[in-house]
Image (cartoon, grey):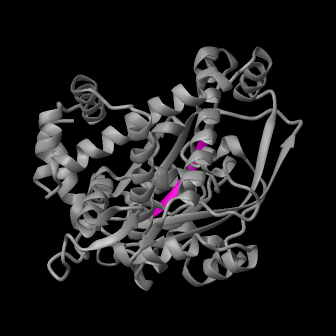
Amino acid sequence: MSGKTFRKTMIAACALALCSVQVSAQDLFAPVAQVDQRIITEFEVQQRQRFLRVLGASGSSRSEVIEELIRDRLREDETRQSGIVLGPDELAQGLSDFAARAQLSTEEFVEGLASEGIAEETFRDFVNVSIVWRDYIRARFGNRVRVDDREVDRAVDSARGNSGIEVLVSEIIIPAPPPRAEQVLEQAEAISQATTEAEFSDFARRFSATASRGAGGRLPWTPISELPPVLRPLLLALGPGQVTAPLQIPNAVALFQLRDIRETAAPQRSFSAIEYAAYYIDGGRTPEALARARAISARVDRCDDLFGIAKGQPDNVLDRGSLPPEEIPDDIAIELAKLDPGEVSTALTRAGGNTLVLLMLCGRTPALEEDQVIDRDAIATQLRNQRLNAFSETLLADLRAEADVRIFE
């Protein structure tokens, strides 16, 4: 990604997510929260929100950002008392590694952030506290984490499809065109606090744009391997009744509630490619566009039929392709997971909500056994990191319980 492309991406993200942020009406250095004697300011909150949204990261609502800044203060105090400080060279390497994810140098990355009003210190602080805390957790708890061969074997069996996990999930996908992006994100944050299936289903009937809204967002038992890669770890981290944090997808926000989970004797299927077609209809979610989508759906039974519908129209009105699951955009992958070949979805939009997407699943290509290369060392590292993260979360909960934390909102 070039610096020019990066800046264009950030400008688009800013237009979507930052246009409703209040700036001039507030004192940017007014206290928003306090952790013991350390203040978190309005400036820090707005800077972190901008930073996360420009990156397209989750957890960028105001309440989530304030909570994470509180956790950062707790991390900083704990590591400072332990004498762990990141040297200039180590910090420079961390900044470089982070910028490299966008195929940019540190200087290009900082320049792109600055063009969107994000201070270099916001980037530096974010990276610094992450690296120092990671090193501290590894040093403090690393000798308490053991992963033996049997545990790796079980994980390998699961990766190879020798065991199956199915989930019972409810969904809510709320359209979020640019003028309503901030409002919808705040609404989704409130919905994510739902504690019962009945409460979540009521929200689904009121706000969701998917075909499942009539059933309260409830989906049938689904193999975890058929869900988008982005969803699998989120759902496996939940207990029954819990809801994911809002997941931002193009022109919409998605939430999922885990209703139940079970292990089956059936092998877990995996796919090397998923073929789908997307036909674009002007008008977004207007009654006219939706009516046209229903009329087209009634006339087509397979993806090839869409070529006849698109005949004589511009080439860009119809997309058809076959991609590995991990390369499919998250919002499309979420919808495809619910479809059988020949079925369609009209839950998605493009062009800031002005174009309706008629999405059809063409087929799924099963992965061959010999294509599955298992890296046992990588799996062992992943298991260790999961356990270190559990230690980290427990320690942060203890630190917060002992600290004097105040939120002034």
Q: Residue 356 at what x, y percent from top left? A: 40, 69
Q: Quadrant of the N terminus?
A: top left
**Residue 218 among magenta residues:** no
Residue at left offset 63%, top offset 41%: 390
User: Does residue 387 appear left or right of residue 161 in this picture?
Assistant: left
Res 168 visible: yes
Q: Kindly indicate the quadrant of the structure image that contains residue 289.
A: bottom left
**Which is more toward the observer, 124 or 152?**
124
Residue extending furthest toward the right: 265
Q: Position of residue 30 (x, y in %)?
A: 24, 74
Q: Which residue shows up at 19% across the image and 47% down it? A: 121
User: Magenta residues?
Assistant: 354-363
User: Is residue 355 in view?
Assistant: no
Is the stretch drawn in magenta largely helix, strand or loop? strand
Residue depicted at x 30% and y 68%: 352
Q: Quadrant of the C terminus?
A: bottom left
Of the pair 360 and 107, the residue shown nearer to us:
107
What x and y, as percent, mark residue 4?
A: 11, 43
Q: Nearer the viewer, residue 229 or 19?
A: 19
- Quarter-wise, where is residue 160 in the image? top right
321 and 77: which is toward the camera: 77
Residue at x 23% of width, y 23% of height = 89
